[in-house]
Amino acid sequence: MSRRDALFAAGAGLAASVLPTAAFAAGGPTTTVKPDEALEKLKAGNARYVAAPEVCSADLGKKRSSVAQSQTPWATIISCADSRVPPELLFGGVGPGELFIARNAGNMVDTATMGTIEYGAAVLGVPLIVVLGHERCGAVAAACDVVTKKATFPGSIGPMVAAIVPAAQAVNGKPGDFVDNAVRESAKRTAQQVASKSKIVADLIKAGKVKVVAGRYDLDDGKVEFL
């Protein structure tokens, strides 16, 4: 089955039930890593990055050639577009073919990003989905300004920020740093959205094939906290 055929099959069949694993092959084998194993791999990689970032490198030439014909990623990361939050590095120098990544300001999930998540889970067989917020996120700070200062933003920035406003409203006035509280709340809400609003992902979770978690990356010390 070609990758295109597999994607169409997944979209049609998963609306009713989870397809057999073979239908997710996308022209090749999928990872054998289980959801909890994938989470532990991310935690271990981040620990390496924090303790000894200089050793977090990959043999990119060798790795590139080994995955040129097919990929078996074991985690999907929905990350902020912030240039200080590179998922492959902060999870321990993960090489090509291991992480399936979608990035946008505020690590939100729109239609295109949800489709990316579903493709990764249903077609590529990715067992773990992580919504990764981060310290001092500009998009979240803008949403907080909407709540407290009635700020407005031009072009497509306004609607982008508006999607984060409900999370900011939910933590407004609570103890602690407003922006950081909103970062955590937004990541958790987005993870819940992925798990509940996608029929494809929900069915895979029910079948024990996929786990969805939220996290927060600390810009200062490099640590990822899973919420």
Image (cartoon, grey):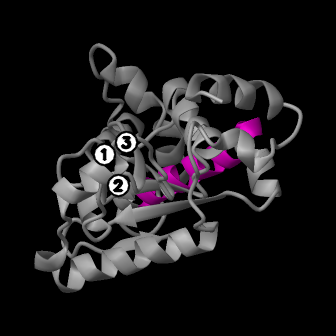
> Which badge, 2 or 3, is on the more N-terminal residue?
3
Q: Mark 1, mark 3: which one is toward the viewer?
A: 3
- Gap between marks 1 and 2, in whole Å? 6 Å
Q: Are marks 1 and 2 in contact (CB under 8 Å)?
A: yes
Describe the element under mark 3 as helix, strand or loop. loop
Q: Which residue is mark 3?
A: 106
As drawn, the residue found furthest toward the left would be 54
Label 2 secondary element: helix
- First in sequence, mark 1 or 2: give its number: 1
* Amino acid type at image mark 1: Ala
Q: Amino acid at mark 3?
A: Gly
In the rendered view, does 23 fall on the left or right side of 42? right
Query: Residue at horizontal 17%, vertical 68%?
Result: 57
Magenta highlight on residue 199:
yes
Q: Which residue is mark 1?
A: 141
Q: Which residues are magenta?
A: 181-200
